[in-house]
Amino acid sequence: MALQIYNTLTRTKEKFVPQEPGNVKMYVCGPTVYGYIHIGNARPAIFFDVVRSYLENQKYDVNYVVNFTDVDDKLIRKAEEMKLPVPQVASMFIEAFYADLEGLRIPRATANPRVTENMETIINFIRELERKGFAYEKGGDVFFRTSKFADYGKLSGQNIEELQFGIRIDVDARKESPVDFVLWKAAKPGEIHWESPWGQGRPGWHIECSAMSRLLLGDTLDIHGGGQDLEFPHHECEVAQSEAMTGKPLANYWMHNGYVNIDGEKMSKSLGNGVLVKDLLTRHKPEAIRYAILSTHYRNQVNFSAEIMAQAERSVERISNAASNLLYRLNSTEGQSSELKISESLEQKLAGISAAFHTKMQDDFNTADAITAMFDWASEVNSLLQQSDVSLADLEAAYQLFKEMNGVLRIAVEAEAELLDDEIEALIEERTEARKAKNWARADEIRDLLDTQGIILEDTPQGMRWRRK
C-alpha cells in the first residue's frame, strides 16, 4: 500500500512522497483568536490531528505547525468591546482554544506561532518582496503586485481577469490592480501597531502564514492544510507571496476540508446557527464529536444535528463497550487459557480488519470507511467473548489492534484496567481525609473516578462502604 493524497493544486490523488524520507513538514492555518471556537473550527483541528496521527502510525516524524492570528480587525473590535488590550484578549481565547483541544482529545501541535511574536520576520519578508518588485507602498499600506506573479490563481483555479467568487476586494484607488492585496496596513489612530519601514502599522492577513511557515518549516512544506473557505483568497495569496519570495513551491500537497452544515444549513453568523465546541462538550462525549466529524469524508460537507450526535453516541458506545469488555476479560483469569500463540483463524480475521483499515486510511485518509473496520473489529470481539475459553494471546492481539486503530481516530473511549479492591479502599480513605480537610475538589475527583469504574459508595452505620454496579 502507498499513501495517496488528493492534492487541491492538481485536483488529483497523488502518491505521498515527503521531501525527506521519514520526515513530514505540515502547516495548517489556525484560528483568529477573538472568540471561542465553533464546530466549523473544530473540523480541521480534528481531521488534521488524524492526518498527523496516521502519519506517525506510519513511522513518520511529523513537524506540525498551527498558527494563531492574534491581531486583526476582528480582534481589535473585540478588544474595544471588552475594554481590554488586544494581546490580553488573544491570550484569553488561546487558552480557551487549548482547553477545547484537550476536551476533543487533540494533542497540541509541534508549534503554535503567534503573529505578534514574529513581527520582525514578517516585516523582513515584506521588505524582501518589495526589493524584488513584488510589493509596493502607497500611503503607509503595502500591497502585493499580482500582475508580476504569473501563476496567481493556480491553486484555486481562478482566472485573474474574472475573479468574482469568494474574493475580498477593498475598493482602493491606490492599488495598481483591483486584485492586489495588502501585506501591511497603516495603523488607524489608537490602534495597536508596530514600527516598520512604512510607518506604524500591522500585517495583513495573508502574509503571516507565509512568513511563519518559512521560519519554522523552510521554503517548501510537504503538506499545507486548512478549511475549504481558505482556498481563496488566503491560500492563493500565500502561494503568490511565498513563491515570489523563494522561487520554490510553497507546498507539495494542498489539503482542504469541506464545510460544516448545521441541521442542513450552512453555518453562518447571519443565521446565528453556530455551535461552540465548549458547549458541545457539556452535552456529548468528545469521542462522539470526533465520530460525527470523521464519519464523513473530509473533502465532503458534513452535517451536524442533534439526531446525528445521538447516532454518534450510540456508535461510540458500541465500539467502546466491546473494548471495555475485552479489557475486562483480558485482566481476568476466568474463561481464558494461557496459550501464548494466537489462533490461526483469529489471526486471519484481525489481519483482514487491519488491512481494511489501512487501505481506507491510505486512500486519501478515508476515515468514514476506516470506521467500518472498527465496527467489524467490535463484531469480531463480541463473538470472541462469547467463547467460554479464550487464549490470552487471542485477547491481547485483539486489544492491540483496537489500540492501533483508535490511536489514530480516537472515536472510542479507551477503558482503563479495573481498580483492584485494595486500590478502591485506599481511594475511599483518601476521599474521607480530603472531605475532613475540606478539599472538596480532590474529594469530587475521587468520587468521579470511582463512578467511572462502576463503584457505588454507600453510607452505613459502620461507615462508608462500596460495591460494584
Image (cartoon, rainbow, N blue to C red):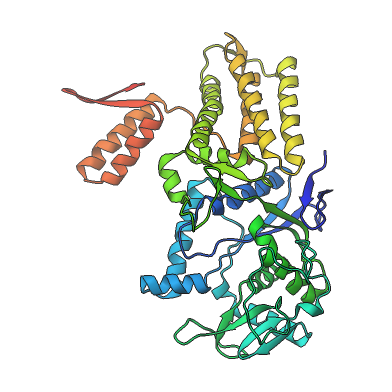
Residue reaching furthest to the top: 388
Task: Give the camera-side residue of 423 and 250.
Answer: 250
102 relative position to 233: left or right:
left
Residue 42 is situated, as x and y percent measured from the top left of the image, at: 55, 51
Task: Give the camera-side residue of 108 and 100.
Answer: 100
The residue sitting at 46% across, 54% down in the picture is 272
Residue 64 is situated, as x and y percent measured from the top left of the image, at: 65, 57
- Residue 249 lies in quadrant: bottom right
Task: Tell me if residue 384 comes above or below residue 435 in the rendering.
Answer: above
20 relative position to 238: left or right:
right
Task: Tell me if residue 73 comes above or below residue 104 in the rendering.
Answer: below
Task: Give the camera-side residue of 168 and 416.
Answer: 168
Residue 353 is situated, as x and y percent measured from the top left of the image, at: 71, 26
Residue 461 is situated, as x and y percent measured from the top left of the image, at: 15, 22
- Residue 88 lies in quadrant: bottom left
The residue sitting at 77% across, 64% down in the picture is 158
Q: The C terminus is located in which quarter?
A: top left
Task: Tell me if residue 37 comes above or below residue 349 in the rendering.
Answer: below
Residue 227 in sight in this render: no
Task: Give the camera-side residue of 180 and 285.
Answer: 180
233 relative position to 363: left or right:
left
Q: The N terminus is located in which quarter?
A: top right
Total marks shown come to: 0
Residue 297 in sight in this render: yes
Task: Tell me if residue 139 comes above or below residue 5 in the rendering.
Answer: below
